[in-house]
Amino acid sequence: MHSQNLIQSLSSQWPATLPGVVRLGIDLVHVPRIAESLRDFGDRFAQRLFTDAEIAYARSSGSEQAARFAARFAAKEATIKTLSLSDAGVNWRDMEVQRAADGACSLVLRGEALAAARSMGVGRLLVSLSHDGDYAAAVVAALSDTDEPHR
């Protein structure tokens, strides 16, 4: 009974909506699948999906190359889900994962991806990447460009 009271107390303090959060997307990628595509299609595969900066970062680590590409692939898939772009035919290179010196990642949008985000009232995207063993994952949160709560 004590835990039920605690849950009710906490939930009554939590807002019904989260100000600023518009949408959330997640994706999980099998790293060996990306490694196979890199092996089979090489530069054509990389150039079609990734920006020059993403390619340079991924290739800067031979042993982690496929995992780095997979994490960025997951981020792009999560962005497509977050912004409902699956039917828009967005250019994958219009979504770029940028890595800061401290290791934090951010997303930069261009073209149709940027237009879609603006039309949804998205002012900023947050991204979190992870990879371990055979899997890479990404979560993308779209934040409103206003302080208005979204339902």
Image: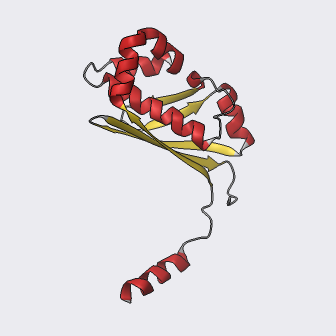
The foreground one among 130 and 53 is 130
Q: Position of residue 11 (x, y in %)?
A: 51, 76
The foreground one among 85 and 148 is 85
Residue 4, compared with residue 102, is above or below; it is below
Q: Which corner quadrant holds the N terminus?
A: bottom left
Q: Position of residue 118 (x, y in %)?
A: 71, 39
Residue 111, compared with residue 39, is above or below; it is below
Is any part of residue 100 visible from this angle? no
Is any part of residue 45 visible from this angle? yes
Q: Please identify the residue farthest to the bottom as the structure is shown.
A: 1
Residue 117, compared with residue 36, is above or below; it is below
The foreground one among 101 and 106 is 106
Q: Position of residue 14 (x, y in %)?
A: 54, 72
- How many discs appear? 0
Residue 149, compared with residue 52, is above or below; it is below
Instruction: Name the residue located 62 percent from the left edge and 60 percent from the top edge.
Output: 19
Instruction: Name the residue located 42 percent from the left edge and 84 percent from the top edge.
Output: 4
Residue 150 as seen in the image, left or right of residue 8: right
Q: Position of residue 81 (x, y in %)?
A: 58, 41
Question: On the image, which quarter does residue 151 sit in?
Answer: bottom right
Instruction: Name the residue located 38 percent from the left edge and 26 percent from the top edge.
Output: 33
